[in-house]
Image (cartoon, helix red, strand yellow):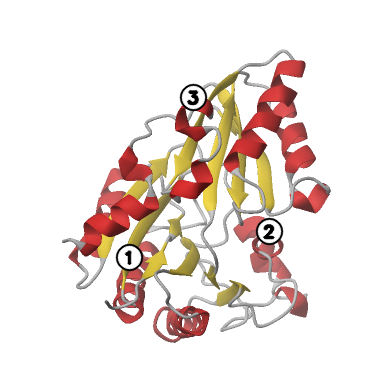
Amino acid sequence: MTPWVECVPNFSEGRDADVLAALRETIVRAPGVHLLDWSADEDHNRSVFTFVGPPLEASDALFAAARVAAERIDLRSHQGQHPRIGALDVAPFVPLEGLDWSVAIETAHIFGRRLWQELSIPAYFYARAATTPDRELENVRRGGFEGLREAVLVDPSRRPDVGGPALHPSAGATAVGARKFLVAFNVNLATRDPTLARRIARTIRASSGGYPAVKALGLELPHAGLTQVSMNLTDYEVTSPSTVFTRIEAEAKSAGVAVAGSELIGLIPRAALEPLGAEGMLIQDFSPDRILENRVRQARAG
């Protein structure tokens, strides 16, 4: 059985149906890969795709989608709640089924160099693909596209690992990584005031002394009339979705605010649902098709 890699690219587009369709069709048409899931968020103005395949084929599919993003997404006019630095903002490679980490890291490095050589988009390497210290995603994205395009011209520590120093005028730069499974998990609060979401995010995120392996932001969701604690759980075996959900629910309750539900972005490993389960965490629109192992098995079976 050929080892596979999982790709979970994040694109800075969540509103334009034509652009989203073009990205989806590019991945679907790519030989040797299987699109498992995709979603788009209007408030974040961001979309996330999950697909799997052999490293070379997966990298080629992701590059084809990156080309579409560079042609169709212009960050100079992009507005959204989620921090971003690129049209293809994040490009992680996650090893599956015994794929050696060295292969995932090499695939990430080759992909980053190709972005620069063929599309003139600089790349930052993060997580296990990092080649310099302090390449945490939040550090790379500090200031967003607008801040980073100025910083790279005056601060050598902010310059890309490949290409640059200037960013691509409209497509920015891309953070390319090799990492473990990440659970993108958001909890929505039944209030329009973002103060509570921001306070809870500070309480739980690792960088502020909260739970290890938790990255969190408090965001407004004006279209939904809610606010959100938006999280990346970078190691669910260290801090689970159940742990952060329980804490967020308790903090919100103490402030007199109800939890309006939670959502997954992309897929989730089965073990990451324990112990509360999808129902206990109020995960909306959940089904067995959101479990990573189920979708990989289906793809393997054709």
Answer with left or right where residue 238 lies relative to residue 32. Answer: right
Which numbered disc covers residue 41? none
Which corner quadrant holds the N terminus?
bottom left
Which x, y percent locates residue 53?
Answer: 30, 70
Upstream in the sequence, badge 2 or badge 1? 1
Look at label 1 and name its amino acid. Val
In the picture as drawn, the residue positioned furthest to the left comes out as 302
Q: CA distance from mark 3 to mark 2?
A: 26 Å
Q: What amino acid type should be assigned to the residue bearing mark 3?
A: Ala
Label 1 to label 3: alpha-carbon separation: 32 Å
Circle 2: residue type: Glu
Q: Nearer the viewer, mark 2 or mark 1?
A: 1
Residue 36 lies in what quarter of the image? bottom left
Which one is earlier in the sequence, the residue at label 3 or at label 2?
2
- Residue 16 position in % (x across, y down): 34, 45
Q: Position of residue 64 (x, y in %)?
A: 30, 71
Mark 3, residue position: 224
Left or right of residue 133: residue 95? left
Mark 1 and mark 3 lie on one chain; the one further toward the N terminus is 1
Residue bearing the label numbered 1 = 52
Q: Nearer the viewer, residue 128 or 149?
A: 128
Q: Nearer the viewer, residue 124 or 33?
A: 33
* Marker disc for residue 138: 2
- Residue at point 63% right, 77% down? 130
Is label 3 in a helix, a strand or a loop?
loop
